[in-house]
Amino acid sequence: MKEEEIEVAIKVVVVGNGAVGKSSMIQRYCKGIFTKDYKKTIGVDFLERQIEVNGEDVRLMLWDTAGQEEFDAITRAYYRGAQACVVAFSTVDRDSFDAVTNWLQKVENEVGQIPSVLVQNKMDLTAESTVTQEETEELATKLNTRLYKTSVKENTNVNEVFRYLAELYLSQMSSLSEENTSSHTIGCDIFGTGDPVVKRSSKKTNGIIHLKPSKQRTQGKKKMLDRCTLL
């Protein structure tokens, strides 16, 4: 198999309260469509998109998780093996903003600290906003994450969110490889590729877990498996 057929695959979980626009965001990014009709996600949904980042082929595997508490046990299982995270809240939903820290903590409880981004969605409804600009910026600073203000309806900053995550992930992996420190791998092959998905440096790194990209081999238009084997 040719070298150019090897790509980097990144598992991205999208979390946040229900009705903040997580499913719409993923649909917009992967399929280029938008619908204003709200349909509650039951458990977990999955879509993917391939992009090029700094000359590297990257396949983003986006896991859309339910925001309702009754699905919490199900969705937490799908956090395992995540390599990046989007935490979303709605401009017009104060409760979703207040829940951001809790959502990020749920993900970190399963996989440790991973590249993350904070998304304030529904910016087309700023006239009805229930949070201030100062509050959102303070939260982003507190969580040490970049804040993107998006409108899925108007397709504002949606592409930028996922490109930033891919760039951040690849940058961290590049820095890790340059450290030339001893390391060990943990976890399982959640996508059936034969590669371990988590790589933790033995050198102290302020609690940050560095993740090893899983190499996916593709041939023609063959698609990724829509299911993963969980721990």
Image: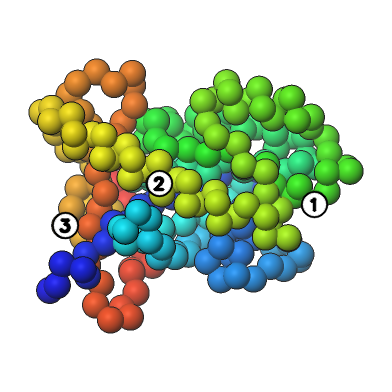
Residue 77 position, x and y percent, is 41, 45
Q: Is residue 98 left or right of residue 53?
A: right
Residue occupied by mark 3: 194
Q: Going by the picture, which residue comes out furthest to the front?
A: 54
Frontmost residue, 95 versus 180 = 180
| Quarter where residue 173 is shown | top left
Residue 54 position, x and y percent, is 35, 54
Check disc 1 and report its element: helix, strand or loop: helix
Query: Residue at point 60% right, 36% down?
Result: 147
Residue occupied by mark 1: 124
Amino acid carrying mark 3 in the image: Gly
What label does residue 205 carry, if any? none
Residues at discs 1 and 2 in contact (Cβ within 8 Å): no
Q: Is residue 89 left or right of residue 143?
A: right
Q: CA distance from mark 3 to mark 2?
A: 24 Å
Amino acid carrying mark 2 in the image: Glu
What label does residue 167 carry, if any? 2
